[in-house]
Image: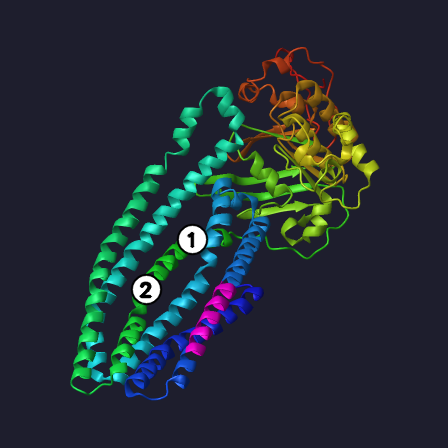
Amino acid sequence: MATGTWAPLTLTLMVTVAGSVTALALPAVLAGTVDAVVAGRNTLPATRNLALLLVGMTLLDIASVVAGAACVASAVVSLRMRLVGRLLAASAVEAARFPTGELVNRLVSNTATTAYVPVTLLRTAVGVITSAGGVVALFTIDWRVGTAFLAGVPLTLVVIRLLFTRMSGLYDDYQAAQGRLATRLTETLAGIRTVRAAGTVDREISRVLDPLPELSAAGQALWKVQSRSVWQLALMLPLIEVFVLGVAGFGVAEGRLEPGALLAAAGYTTLALAFVGQIESLMDVAYGRSAAQRVCQVLALPVLAPGSVPLAAGPGTLSFRGVTVTREGGPLLDGIDLEIPAGAMTAVVGPSGAGKTTLALLAGRLADPDRGQVLLDGQILGEVDPASLRSAVAYAFERPALLGGDIASAIAYGNATSGIEEVRAAASAAHVDDVIRRLPAGYRTPAAEAPLSGGEIQRLGLARALLPRARLTILDDATSSLDTATEAQVTSALVEGMRGRTRLVIAHRPATAARADLVVWLEAGRIRAQGTHRELWRDPAYRALFASEPAALAGRDRSPITVPAATRPDHAVQNQEESCPATP
């Protein structure tokens, strides 16, 4: 629990305990007032005490509500900060286990539900202690009265126990179904244009609402358990109360008890039965327990342990040594041994699910391998100081997030020392400067309000990756939304404008692979082959990777590819019948 949560929780405890003490004192003070009236004594002191007690109880109730609200608000903030911090520090591969909608549900709904648990438990505990005090007070009035109360308690406890046990599992089912529904809704909202364009609104509504029967079934099961237990308790509690008052009434009739004792017995019976009123609190705890488990699943994500060694200067050689990444479905990468030459542009190709994105995540230590090592210029990434590593590695993603405020800040995100001229130079290299200048406020246009296409947003992401002139630049499908002409311009910038810096590019188009110095062909998490695009083109299976873009193969210049010595093949390509596209 956060430090800021302890103060309001402690205050809540203090005022709740004080309220419990005043509640226990009230029946005795009220009985004393009645006895004074019946006996004809001066009632002013008793009446004054009763009035002061009622005012105190009212003020304590108000203080308890305010302190409890402050405690819950503090706990919500703390939980959400911890959850976001864990997600940002966790391996990107591990975090991907949770769909976006599921994470939003846990971050917003489940944290709020969990935050109520400490206050609810505290008030429940004080309520139980108050009930125990009421029982002791009944025995103080007369042992027969106390015994009459205890006679009905065991059966009541059995009913409460059964209710709590049944509802815990049902809450798990309810929140799981709620999470699935939230995930599907988030997916649909993200792809709303696709849904409308495809004319599949009705089908998508059905898909989103598919978990609704499970949600309804869990909700109805909760209602049935509650209704079954409520009528049982509603029958038992009045019977206990009538029995206790009957015994106390006989005591008054026999002269063993004062008339005020009957009123005190009624008040203390109500307090003693207050533990039954904690059933709702216990149900809230059961609901909170289920929510807390879902929050803890995210908080249990393994984080990337930060290294402490500064990254030494180097040319940018990237090495994968026996790298394996395994998840529930099997290996994502299996025994990868790969050397990315310094200063070269390396394209990674392969079918969907081959492990390309996982390789890209490992290259900049957004994830760690389960086995093996990833090294940059001979240093293990896991041992390198994160700040030092981030300054040496830049990323561009398929769907870049424009963070930071305006367009200039979005490009300079993570590079606070960059000036506007450097930002413009990076935007020009990514062929997006002209687009930005046409915006209403140019580079000061708020990113959230800028009317940009998917390809233009991708180019902003590319500009952000080009800005720091990093030793290693990783492009994870970062040109997929670009048209052919723009992609050719961007690829030229990657080849010519970044010459001498290491580039790792996840490629889906033959033109990109053709301009690379080295192509790594992944299949089922393993390296099937590596070499130049021209060399690999002789394999029909390699050509089939690009079969969806035949137009890209037509009319290409047949000029040779310039290959660094580290990756130049030992033999020339002899088969001219299977020549491949080269530099556009």
Q: Give the alpha-carbon distance from disc 2 to disc 1, as whole Å.
A: 23 Å
Q: Which mark is residue 353?
A: none
> In the picture shown, does residue 400 fall above or below 91?
above
Look at discs 2 and 1 and give the one toward the viewer. 2
Look at 75% across and 24% down and name the residue there. 492
Would residue 477 be found to the left or right of residue 19 on screen?
A: right
Residue type at tag 1: Ala
- Find numbered disc 1 in the image and state the secondary structure of the residue it sits on: helix
Say whether residue 151 is visible: no
The quarter of the picture where residue 396 lies is: top right
Residue 281 x/y as whole percent: 37, 61
Q: Main secondary structure of the magenta part?
A: helix
Would residue 496 be found to the left or right of residue 36 on screen?
A: right
Look at 25% across and 67% down and name the residue there. 157
Say whether residue 527 is visible: yes
Look at 23% across and 61% down and name the residue there. 233
Q: Residue furthest right?
A: 421
Based on the picture, tell me whether residue 65 belongs to the magenta stretch. Answer: yes
Q: Which residue is mark 1?
A: 291
Residue 426 x/y as whole percent: 78, 33
Q: Nearer the viewer, residue 315 or 170?
A: 170
Residue type at tag 2: Gly
Count of residue discs: 2
> In the picture shown, does residue 160 fall above or below 324?
below
- Find numbered disc 2 in the image and state the secondary structure of the residue it sits on: helix
Look at 72% across and 14% down and name the residue there. 557
Q: Which residue is mark 2?
A: 277
Magenta stretch: give its range.
Answer: 51-68
Q: Earlier in the sequence, mark 2 or mark 1?
A: 2
